Image (cartoon, grey):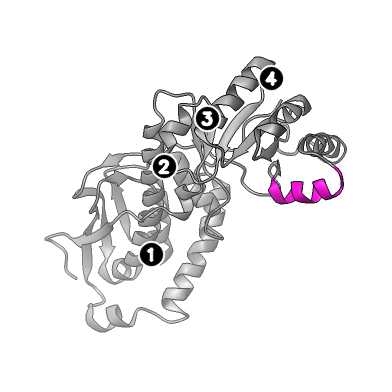
Amino acid sequence: MASEFTAVDWDDRLVEDFQHLLYLAVREDLGRHYDLTTMAVVDEGAVGHAALVARQKGVVAGMPAARLVLAEFDARLVISPRHHDGDDVEPGTVLATIDGPARSLLTAERLVLNFVGRLSGIATLARRYVRKVTGTKARIYDTRKTTPGWRRLEKYAVRIGGGWNHRQGLYDAVLIKDNHLALAVGQHRSPADAVRRARVFIEHHCGDERGAPTVVEVEIDSLDQLDAVLDAAPDIILLDNMRPSELAEAVRRRDTSGSICILEASGSVRLETVAEIAATGVDRISVGALTHSAIWLDVALDWLPNAVP
């Protein structure tokens, strides 16, 4: 049985996604012109020396993005990291210093802060969830509730925070959800029937292009559906919006049956509730809030004493 989804790393594919975002970010900030303020008040030959500083406690993410932003604006800008993605930092921590033409540095400043702040905020929240379930078997997973265009970047940030990646997109796995099942019921098919049909489809239509078997997951919202779905042997059963007592019973039934199916809890998971959910014995907890509700980490650019802005 398949069980794991593709993990996001800072690789060529992620860099390609980032370059598309960076193109749009530069265009919306500069149009097809230039930074009017900087050109008006900063001398052409001025040299800048600045620090990228965390104003809040958190987890760093997006330092490779900062380097690419600076390179896009001016190859003469040099970033010297003092911290790297995954590091825990305290308020006032210098993440990196940046040296080079002051005009270019000022023009690139906001984009650097936007990318590092957003990604660090996601990594910070992910780590808070991960720490809440320490000592249990449960892993924290993200979802597809991501900012359009940012998905791979945001999932990377979840990984940096210690979380795990769920499917990348609709192409990446079979996940039979409530609306699929609503149609299936109208066609006199049960969740178990939907699993079996998915297996047949995969066998006939899906090659081994991903280098791994295709994961089949099915969502249920009632324990009444569980035994039949276990018999159909999906890779993962998504237990949607179930109470902790129901999750614990689902784990007991799965274990008693001898099934190796993974159980994933989902729906309205919060920092206040995730530890109780993990204590039920589920294998995975998927949390949309990691990406749709993360607050940016406050990151700033401070001129250092020998700057000539």
Type of residue at label 4? Answer: Ser
Front label number (3 vs 4)? 3
Q: Mark 1 belongs to which amino acid?
A: Leu
Reading the chain from its start, which is encountered first: label 1 or label 3? Answer: 1
Tell me the residue at 50%/32% (across/down).
244
From mark 2 to mark 1, how far is it between C-alphas?
A: 23 Å
Q: Residue at x 47, y 43 (%)?
A: 269
Q: Which residue is mark 1?
A: 111
First-in-chain label (3 vs 4): 3
**Looking at the picture, does residue 275 appear above or below residue 176?**
above
The numbered dot on residue 303 is none
Q: Secondary structure at mark 1?
A: helix
Q: Quadrant of residue 218?
A: top right
Residue at mark 1 to residue at mark 3: CA–CA distance: 46 Å
**Does residue 211 appear in this view?**
no
Classify residue 203 by image quadrant.
top right
Depth check, front residue: 44 or 23 = 23
What's the magenta bit mostly, secondary-structure-wise?
helix
Q: Which residue is tagged 3?
A: 245
Nearest to N terminus: mark 2 or mark 4: 2
What mark, if any, has residue 259 been given in the picture? 4
